[in-house]
Amino acid sequence: MSLLEVRGLRKSYGALKVTDDLNLSVEAGELHAIIGPNGAGKSTLIAQLSGQAGSDGGSVRFDGTEMTGLPMHRRVRAGMSRSFQITSILPGFTALDNVAVAVQARRGSSFRFFTPVAQEHALNEAALEALNRVGIADRAFFRAGSLSHGEKRQLELAIALATRPRLLLLDEPLAGTSGQEADRLVEVMRSLKGDVTQVLIEHDMDAVFALADRISVLVYGRIIATGTPDEIRGDPAVRAAYLGEEAGEGG
Ligand SMILES: Nc1ncnc2c1ncn2[C@@H]1O[C@H](COP(=O)(O)OP(=O)(O)OP(=O)(O)O)[C@@H](O)[C@H]1O
């Protein structure tokens, strides 16, 4: 059984079928990238998987449990977490406090027998661990608003990781990052492989082809192919529908 099983998922905006009878299986531990042309429905799919957007039909099963219709916080509790946009970071708070809030949301009640000081200590320790995992532990006491764009994206990842997800949904984590910042984020995603299952939407094809265990190609709301990077690169239907010459350059 796959960790994530999506069957017949649908969503329309008026007459526009954005997710059209979509099937997708994500195996435990893999990094599964979803690529496709602009407007193919990638962000909508992530929103449907995370519970941020509703679906018109079909099913999303996570670890055998039906998630369709459940709100986002129930999916997070079950182990599905999406990396939020920078807008959800509290700029006036330290990086550590931003993550600690997420840790508290996850395990608030498990701290109830601790003294307030011990609680704060345990929260900070868990938050620091998440910051360390994404490589910005040295920024723990910096105001989040003062971090570079790339560091903010690392902080978003730390916030998502602080909920201890088994499945991480990543919507364009490299958007707006520079070469070195992008490299660092790629290394973080690589380091999570095998431990945290990742569904990645990303326009940077070099990063996708270097990182993904499998790639699904989404065109007009439907997955037209799923395979290893080599299989996708060599798939004539994919080349015709989307990749064109890019496939040959991808890695
Ligand atoms: N809230 C909405 N209301 C109406 N149409 C929408 C809405 N959100 C998305 N769409 C439309 O649905 C289609 C898919 O959008 P979506 O953002 O999911 O695609 P995408 O593959 O992520 O695109 P991109 O690669 O450009 O980010 C587009 O045609 C978009 O205009």
Image (cartoon, rainbow, N blue to C red):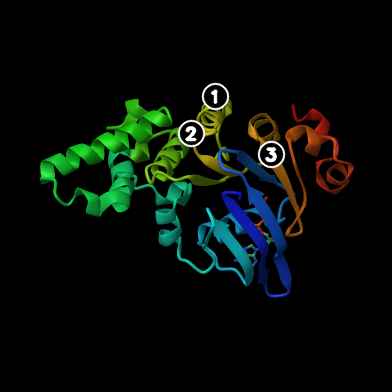
Number of residues whose C-alpha sits closer than 10 Å to that of mark 2, classed few (under 14), some (14–19) or many (20 or more): many
Give the residue pinned by disc 2: 150
Can residue 200 be seen from the camera position used here? yes
User: What kind of element bears circle 3?
Assistant: strand
Q: Name which of mark 2 and mark 1 comes first in the sequence.
A: 2
Residue 51, position in %: x, y?
A: 51, 62
Q: Do residues under tags 2 and 3 come within 8 Å of each other at their CB atoms?
A: no
Tell me the distance, in whole angstroms, between the alpha carbons under discs 3 and 1.
Answer: 25 Å
Give the residue pinned by disc 3: 214
Q: Name which of mark 3 and mark 1 comes first in the sequence.
A: 1
Q: Do residues under tags 2 and 1 come within 8 Å of each other at their CB atoms?
A: yes
Ligand 1 quarter of the rendering: bottom right
Residue depicted at x 71% and y 56%: 39
Amino acid under label 3?
A: Arg
Amino acid under label 1?
A: Gln
Residue depicted at x 81% and y 41%: 243
Give the residue pinned by disc 1: 180
Residue 249, position in %: x, y?
A: 79, 29
Which quadrant would the C terminus be assigned to in this image? top right
Number of residues whose C-alpha sits closer than 10 Å to that of mark 3, classed few (under 14), some (14–19) or many (20 or more): many
Label 2 vs label 3, nearer the camera? 3
Residue 148, position in %: x, y?
A: 43, 33
Q: Nearer the viewer, residue 5 or 49?
A: 5
Residue depicted at x 87% and y 46%: 237
Q: How many discs mark residues in the rendered view?
A: 3
Residue 233, position in %: x, y?
A: 81, 35
Residue 123 position by quadrant:
top left
